[in-house]
Image (cartoon, helix red, strand yellow):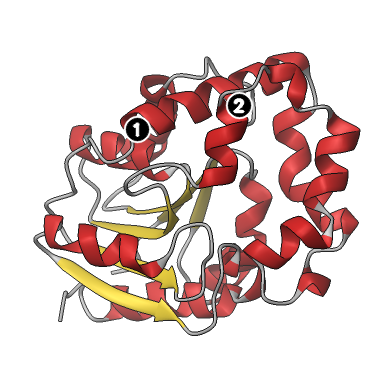
């Protein structure tokens, strides 16, 4: 069965994160729908983020839900209300925010000054923690992936509010009881692999896949790996072994 794939991103990354993954999935005849929790600016609540995901899930037949980073808690909440055929989680807030975003969530929205924030994200100080090869994240890529969440005061305020909601709720939402695929970069400095080791037992039907040498933004560095793992899982009937 060719499941539609619903891919979700949360702050600080926009739906552009999935561009190459979508192209690869669609080459496998798997239609894709991207839900960007930063665009348009929402109300900054976890319930509001989950509602946007629910709209996408309910519009599809037997969808696969894929969530990265800070979108994971909202995806788990949506999956409770409208269970997808399968859930894919990749490098993110299973049990809490990473240290950098935890600090950011405590600051006022004005701290997300567009010029300074994008300059920091494009710097080697930031990139070496989230990608293996900084050259895949040039300035234009950083702008494309991160700019939508800071383009207006409403976006900046919603992003900070959603980060606060994730910090409060991550790790408290029950795991998805259905088929679950966890794809995790094994060198992620922000969300280390041991987070998965302590959480995966909560998922009764879980299949684990590690991205060798993958850091936090492997959807940009290794998009074919992510897409092919999802395609293969679908071809195997969403099995957990």
Q: Quadrant of the N terminus?
A: bottom left
Left or right of 178 in this view: 72 = right
Tell me the residue that label 1 is attached to.
54
Left or right of 11 in this view: 137 = right
From the top left corner, tell me how far across and down residue 121 is, in percent.
78, 49
From the top left corner, tell me how far across and down residue 34 is, in percent.
54, 47
How crowded is the residue under tag 1: few (<14 C-alpha within 10 Å), some, or many (20+)? many
Residue closest to the eye, 240 or 127: 127
Image depth: mark 2 or mark 1 in front: 2
Image: 115 above or below 43:
below
Question: Which picture quadrant has residue 131?
Answer: bottom right
Residue closest to the eye, 40 or 171: 171
Q: Which residue is located at x 63 percent, y 40 percent?
A: 12
Left or right of 86 in this view: 218 = right
Image: 23 above or below 140:
below
Q: Which residue is located at x 58 percent, y 69 percent?
A: 218
Question: Which picture quadrant has residue 132?
Answer: bottom right
Q: Which residue is located at x 72 percent, y 49 percent?
A: 145
Q: Is residue 59 visible?
A: no
Left or right of 68 in this view: 16 = right
Q: Quadrant of the C terminus?
A: bottom left
Residue closest to the eye, 175 or 1: 175
From the top left corner, tell me how far across and down residue 155 is, in percent.
69, 22
Q: Which mark sits nearer the N-terminus, 2 or 1?
A: 1
- Give how far apart the Cα atoms at labels 2 and 1 are: 19 Å
Tell me the residue that label 2 is attached to.
159
How crowded is the residue under tag 2: few (<14 C-alpha within 10 Å), some, or many (20+)? many
Q: Which residue is located at x 28 percent, y 41 percent?
A: 76
């Amino acid at each position: 069965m060719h499941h539609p794939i619903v891919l979700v991103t949360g702050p600080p990354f926009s739906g552009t994160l999935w561009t190459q993954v979508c192209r690869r999935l669609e080459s496998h005849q798997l239609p894709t729908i991207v839900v960007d929790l930063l665009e348009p600016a929402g109300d900054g609540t976890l319930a509001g983020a989950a509602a946007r995901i629910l709209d996408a899930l309910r519009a599809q037949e037997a969808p696969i839900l894929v969530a990265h980073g800070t979108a994971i808690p909202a995806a788990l909440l949506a999956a409770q209300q409208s269970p997808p055929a399968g859930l894919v989680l990749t490098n993110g807030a299973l049990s809490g925010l990473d240290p950098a975003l935890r600090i950011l969530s405590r600051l006022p929205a004005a701290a997300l000054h567009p010029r300074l924030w994008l300059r920091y994200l494009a710097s080697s100080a930031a990139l070496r923690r989230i990608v293996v090869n900084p050259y895949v994240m040039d300035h234009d890529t950083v702008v494309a992936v991160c700019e939508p969440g800071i383009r207006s005061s409403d976006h900046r305020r919603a992003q900070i509010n959603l980060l606060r909601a994730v910090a409060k709720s991550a790790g408290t939402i029950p795991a998805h009881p259905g088929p679950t695929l966890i794809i995790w970069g094994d060198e992620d400095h922000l969300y280390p692999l041991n987070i998965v080791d302590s959480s995966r037992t909560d998922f009764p039907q879980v299949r684990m896949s590690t991205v060798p040498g993958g850091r936090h933004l492997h959807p940009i560095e290794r998009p074919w790996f992510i897409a092919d793992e999802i395609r293969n899982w679908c071809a195997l009937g969403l099995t957990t072994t």
